[in-house]
Image (cartoon, rainbow, N blue to C red):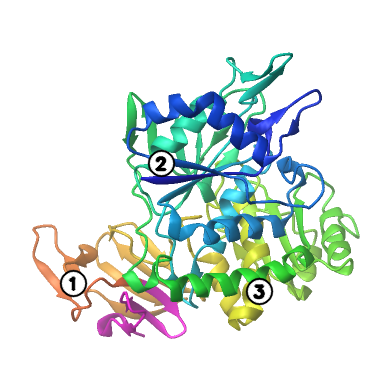
Amino acid sequence: MRICIITTGGTIGSTGHPLSPMPAARFAQAVHDLLGGALAAALPGDRLHVDDGLRFSDDGPGTLDSTDLRPSDWCRIAGRVLDLYDDHDAFVILHGTDTMDYTGAALPLLLNVFDDMGIARAALSKPVILTGAQLPLFRDTDGGLVLNAGSDALANLTGALEAARLRLPEVAVFFDGRLLRGARALKVSTTRFAGFDSPHLGPLATRGIGIHPGAVPPLPGPAAPDRALDAAPARALVRAQLEAVARVIDDQRVAQIAAVPSDHRASDPLMARMVRDALAAGATGLLLEGFGPGNIPAGDGAMASALTQAQVPVMIASRVIGGQVGAFDYAAGAWIGATGAVAAGDMTPVAALAKLMILTAMAPHHGWDRATLSALLARSLAGECAAGDRLTGALWPGQALQAADGPLRLENDHDHGPRLTDGARLLWQAPGPGLLRMQGDRLALIAHDGAVLWSSAPAPGAVAVLTAHPPALRLIDPAGRARPVTALAG
């Protein structure tokens, strides 16, 4: 297996007092000289290449502390992966921990191309694993560089390299023995070696005596060979999208505003004033961190007025580490849905910020209007949130799907079975209770005794997606063709 190690800087590749990143070429030489034999023995049969071609500036070492990474640097990292894609089977990116979770959320969006329904037209087909360390890999001494024996860096580096052998086709973060989905990772500690966690999704794999796959299934990867980045046309789609985003992403000014306890009865509540000030200063998007499930003080209507008048995309996330924003069921937040703000679901605020910034930057390239952009912000594109608008397994009694582009809802009632509703209007009722799932090449309603109560026309390899425009549950096949499930169409 051919594995490419790309260094961007960060603590893992830093030396000196105060710590600063080594030039990539010096780091690559140190890995060769001090670790080459050990890595070759630990990874028999693998060929490792430590790349030193990524530079963030022409001055100094060319690498950066991740504190200084800009959104356009996400594009540089993605571009380097594309440059080297044909020559390697996996990529391990060494990155500073301060913003590793932002890069982990950004790269999946930059290395895939999605259509208006959130289906990948060009898809990452090889592992891209970010790792770093709380302490440097090497230490400067009077006799030159030596391995920093007390660091977590070597374990993280070798763990990421071992995890690459799983060939999971997605962006991940490896830290302290766990492989986490990149868009779900969150930095949680500056002092413990367990510096990252994934509050809503278990690990993709864990490391002990060997690498052990986790209970969470990996992303499926390309639906067909012509959609994989191995294919030149698919890679060209990603390259064109990346170039368009890189030109404008540093101009994106997403204001992240956290709800705080304040006097919402004041004539001009603090949070509403902060929103208006951000918009007046040229914010291109708003990310609001609400309490609990996304609740925000209404401010006697001031917040609703400010958000309704906003001409930019607005997302609502939860400030709670394990928080989730859904249908705004509480009276304290029930008014939010009418403003047009997008609920972030179980996305971390880090992932929501990266997604809002990147999708807004790429919208002109794809010709997405505001409604399409809002729907894509709500949909799970690369596993950054739960896929609430599509069947990923089975729809069991008590579960529901919610369209990303409107109020359409498919709920599996305990007593009556699945029903499709548009607000208070019933569009379709199943012939009886059961679970809804893909069975072979068609969607089927299965009774408790295994009997098939209803099934759709065949659609091999399709994904079932609920859409409000038009109101239907649609089967989308690997070629991107969509057909409504007739019985469930509105």
- Front position in the image: 410 or 4: 4
Mark 3 vs mark 2: in front: 2
Q: Which mark is residue 204?
A: none
Q: Relative to 385, does residue 490 appear above or below in the rendering?
A: below
Residues packed near mark 3 inside 10 Å, few (<14), some (14 to 19) or many (20 plus): some
Whether residues under marks 1 and 3 lie with C-beta atoms below 8 angstroms apart, the answer is no
Q: Residues within 10 Å of mark 1 (few under 14, many from 20)?
A: few
The percent coordinates of residue 304 (x first, y second) are: 75, 67
Q: Which residues are magenta?
A: 465-490
Query: Where, quadrant-wise, is the C terminus in this rendering?
Result: bottom left
Q: Earlier in the sequence, mark 1 or mark 3?
A: 3
Question: Quick check: 16 left or right of 394?
Answer: right
Answer whether residue 335 is visible to the viewer in this image: no
Instruction: Give the CA distance from mark 3 to mark 2.
Output: 34 Å
Where residue 360 appears, as percent x and y from the top left, is 67, 70
Judge depth for marks 1 and 2 and give the one in front: 2
Tell me the residue at 37%/26% (across/down): 41
Label number found at residue 441:
1
Q: Residue at x 47, y 84 (%)?
A: 469
Q: How far apart are the alpha carbons under marks 1 and 3?
A: 38 Å
Residue beneath disc 2: 47
- Which residue is the site of mark 3? 244
- Residue for point 67% across, 20% down: 139
Q: Position of residue 282 (x, y in %)?
A: 85, 68
* Residue type, numbered disc 1: Asp
Q: Amino acid at mark 2?
A: Arg
Q: Quadrant of the N terminus?
A: top left
Judged from the image, the secondary structure of the residue bearing numbered disc 2 is: strand
The amino acid beneath tag 3 is Ala
Q: Position of residue 275 (x, y in %)?
A: 82, 61
- Cα separation between marks 1 and 2: 40 Å
**Residue 365 seen:** yes
